[in-house]
Image (cartoon, rainbow, N blue to C red):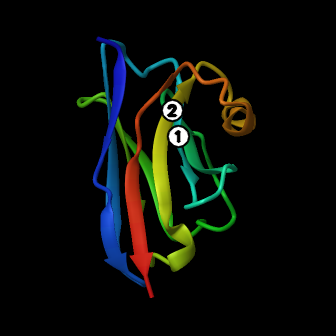
Amino acid sequence: QVQLVESGGGSAQSGGSLRLSCAASGFTLGQYVIGWYRQAPGKEEREGVACVKYSDGTALYDDSVKGRFTISVDNSENAVYLQMNNLKPGDTGQYYCATKDSSVESWWDAVQTHFFDHWGLGTQVTVSS
């Protein structure tokens, strides 16, 4: 079965850390860009957080998370991780991972159109002040 499954969400205090995981099954990530986008409570707009080209590590980050979040891949696990440090209440939202066979720039553009190849059901992150 082809799917992406996110995990690792939860609650944290402002300044705390969480690590999100996204595991792919039924296909290999090697040709894809994979990344995370989020949706804040009560908002329809999706916001790109970070993405990485699985084959060469080229990454993009939203300005709001640069220096705090790190995206990484695990070839042996066919997975991607998002290490989130120094969390802020504004980071609260449902986090989704998604893939696109494209450049990192095209993945970022796809956040608004949701023209992804695969996506998961999401994991909730709640940061309290």
In this figure, which residue is indicated by the disc labeled 2? 98
Evaluate if marks 2 and 1 touch, with contact meaning CB atoms under 8 Å apart: yes
- Secondary element at image label 1: strand
The furthest residue to the front: 42
In percent of the image, x 34 and y 52: which residue is there?
A: 20
In percent of the image, x 66 and y 22: which residue is there?
A: 102
In this figure, which residue is indicated by the disc labeled 1? 35
- Looking at the picture, tell me which residue is in the foreground, 103 or 36: 36
* Image location (x, y in percent) of residue 26: 30, 12
Amino acid type of the residue tagged 1 in the rendering: Gly
Badge 2: residue crowd in 10 Å (few <14, some 14–19, many ≥20): many
Q: Quadrant of the C terminus?
A: bottom left
Above or below, comparing residue 96 to residue 40 in the picture:
above
- Secondary element at image label 2: strand
Amino acid type of the residue tagged 2 in the rendering: Ala
Q: Is residue 36 left or right of residue 6?
A: right
Quadrant in which residue 43 is drawn: bottom right
Above or below, comparing residue 76 to residue 2 in the picture:
below
* Image location (x, y in percent) of residue 94: 47, 53
Quadrant in which residue 2 is drawn: top left
In percent of the image, x 67 and y 38: which residue is there?
A: 111
Q: Is residue 118 left or right of residue 28?
A: right
The furthest residue to the left: 76
* Image location (x, y in percent) of residue 93: 50, 60
Answer whether residue 126 is visible to the viewer in this image: yes
